[in-house]
Structure formats: C-alpha cells, structure tokens
C-alpha cells in the first residue's frame, strides 16, 4: 500500500536530530532507523526550514509526511493554497504517504493551534469523508487520518470513536494513522477499554502506528504531551496489537523536551524489544 516494509520502525524527524541521522547514514553503526516522518508544516510555510537538509536523508531513507492543520472536520472550506503546497512538498520529497488528524482546529479564519475533538455523529461521517476525498484528489498520494487524544466528549455521541474512525476511513477510502498512545490516553480519560478500540479498528487500512509519551496529571487526567518515553502500559498495549495484528510500520514521536539522538535510538530499541516479547 505504501512501499514501506511492514516491520519498519521510524522516527518523527525533528531539527535537533537531522545532523545526527546524517552522520549515522554516512558512517553506518549499530543504529537502525528504517524511515522518517516529516512534519509537513515545518517545510511548506514562509520562513520554513530548508528542504535541502532533507535531501541526503530522503536519498537514504523513505520519507512520510504528517500534518497538523488540514482542519478535516472544520466548518470552513478546505484551503486550496495549503493543499497545493502540501502536494508540492509531497512530490519534492517523494513521500510514501501523507497524514493529518481527525480533528478540527480552526473557525472563521482563526487557527486555534490545537487538535479539537469531533462529535461522534452520523451526519459528520459523510461531511468529513467528502473533505478527505478532496484532499486525496489534491495531493495524489496515499492519505491517512490519525485519531487524537481527547479530554472531553462532545454531544451527540451516536457511536464509539473507533466506529467513527472506521466509518470515515471507509467513506473516504483512506488509510489510518493509528496512535496507540492516544488510544490509551483517551481510554483512561473516558473510562473505556483500549483493547476494544483496537479491536474495532480496520487494520487493513492502518498505514502506520504512532507511539509517544504522556503526562499523568494530579487530577487523574492523562495529557498527551509527547515529552517523555513511551509509558510501559502503552508499550504493553502496542505489543499486544503487534501480536494480534502486526506487523505494521511504527513511528516514535517526541516533540517537547527533546532528548539527544542516543536517547531516541534507545527508545527505538525498547520498542523493538516489546515486539519480540509480545
């Protein structure tokens, strides 16, 4: 579906690690990174990071793209200029696939700089599905939607979130970027079984899986922070998914308090070990 090896294990690329990854590629050592995920907006906006830094990485490793601002469930028309820029970047990087979030993040021309939850309502299935089909037509690449972590539930709630994710993916005929950490965070915050979520996902549509860290708050809420290692319980959930549904490509994300590259590669080794022990 994407040309990636189904067992591939990659990193969400952050500027702090570009030089380290380039050195690993030039002087091979006992460090394995199979592919890289590029944050789309980092390279497609005015004042963006220089794409030239990606060229040697893209020659050596497959690249995929992940975005945060398509506003797939939002009330305003899709930004055609943004879609044009997204396709141009995907073509330049020869991205294997492009993803964004099943969320809304803007209204009346103002970005909220957050990924806000979507009501699990029947009428939104066709609405969001139509918008995703327009994105697919514009970028001419495999496209997938990611489940977000949530902290409140919006009305109406006519189906479980995993059913909403499945129905939208089927309506739009698109892929899924399944964030296992987000599944766990939302399950703890709302009191459902995370395994039930994973059982309800159409795994034949899963392009890739995300893993990241989260913060337990004093009030008991879990906050998806991407600022630490993957929680042991999330890793156990991932290992069970690997045992039952694997293999599938996996990406490690780390967005705040970003550690040295050696810490990232140690975390990749921890994820591989979880697979072997599942």
Image (spheres, rainbow, N blue to C red):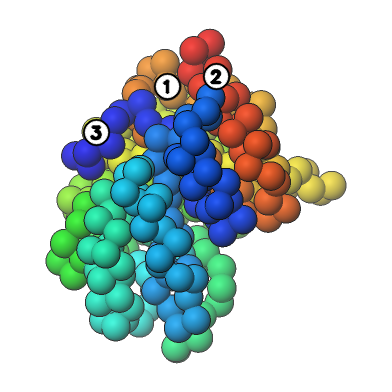
What residue is pinned by disc 3? 204
Q: Percent x, y for residue 229?
A: 67, 37
Please give the name of the residue rendered at 50% of the width and 81% of the height, measured from the top-left corner. 47
Q: Are marks 3 and 1 in contact (CB under 8 Å)?
A: no
- Image mark for residue 274: 2
| Badge 1 or badge 2: first in the primary sequence | 1
User: Which secondary structure lies at badge 2?
Assistant: helix
**Residue 264 point in image, percent of width and height:** 62, 38
The residue under the point 45% across, 83% down is 46
Distance between mark 1 and mark 2 Cα atoms: 9 Å
Residue of label 1:
242
Query: Residue visible at 50% across and 61% down?
Result: 117
Tell me the distance, in whole angstroms, between the alpha carbons under discs 3 and 2. 22 Å
Q: Nearer the viewer, residue 268 or 29?
A: 29
Callout 3 crowding tier (Cα within 10 Å): few <14, some 14–19, many ≥20: few
Q: Give the distance between the C-alpha atoms of the residues marked 3 and 1, in whole angstroms.
A: 14 Å
Judge left or right: residue 207 versus residue 263: left
Q: Secondary structure at mark 1?
A: helix
């Amino acid at each position: 579906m994407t040309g990636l090896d189904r067992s591939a294990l990659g990193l969400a690329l952050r500027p702090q690690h570009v030089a380290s990854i380039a050195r690993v590629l030039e002087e091979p050592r006992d460090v394995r990174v199979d592919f890289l995920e590029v944050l789309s907006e980092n390279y497609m906006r005015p004042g963006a990071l220089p794409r030239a830094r990606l060229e040697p990485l893209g020659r050596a490793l497959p690249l995929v793209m992940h975005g945060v601002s398509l506003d797939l469930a939002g009330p305003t028309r899709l930004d055609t200029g943004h879609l044009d820029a997204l396709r141009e970047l995907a073509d330049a990087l020869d991205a294997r696939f492009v993803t964004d979030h099943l969320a809304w993040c803007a209204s009346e021309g103002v970005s909220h700089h957050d990924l806000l939850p979507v009501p699990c309502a029947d009428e939104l299935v066709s609405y969001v599905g139509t918008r995703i089909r327009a994105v697919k037509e514009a970028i001419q690449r495999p496209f997938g939607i990611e489940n977000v972590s949530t902290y409140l539930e919006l009305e109406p709630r006519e189906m479980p979130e995993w059913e909403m994710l499945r129905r939208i993916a089927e309506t739009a005929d698109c892929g899924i970027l399944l964030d296992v950490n987000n599944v766990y965070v939302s399950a703890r915050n709302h009191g459902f079984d995370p395994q039930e979520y994973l059982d309800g996902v159409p795994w034949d549509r899963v392009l890739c899986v995300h893993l990241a860290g989260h913060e337990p708050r004093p009030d008991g809420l879990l906050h998806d922070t991407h600022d630490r290692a993957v929680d042991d319980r999330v890793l156990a959930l991932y290992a069970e998914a690997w045992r039952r549904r694997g293999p599938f490509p996996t990406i490690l994300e780390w967005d705040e308090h970003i550690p040295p590259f050696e810490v990232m590669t140690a975390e990749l080794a921890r994820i591989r070990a979880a697979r072997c022990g599942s």
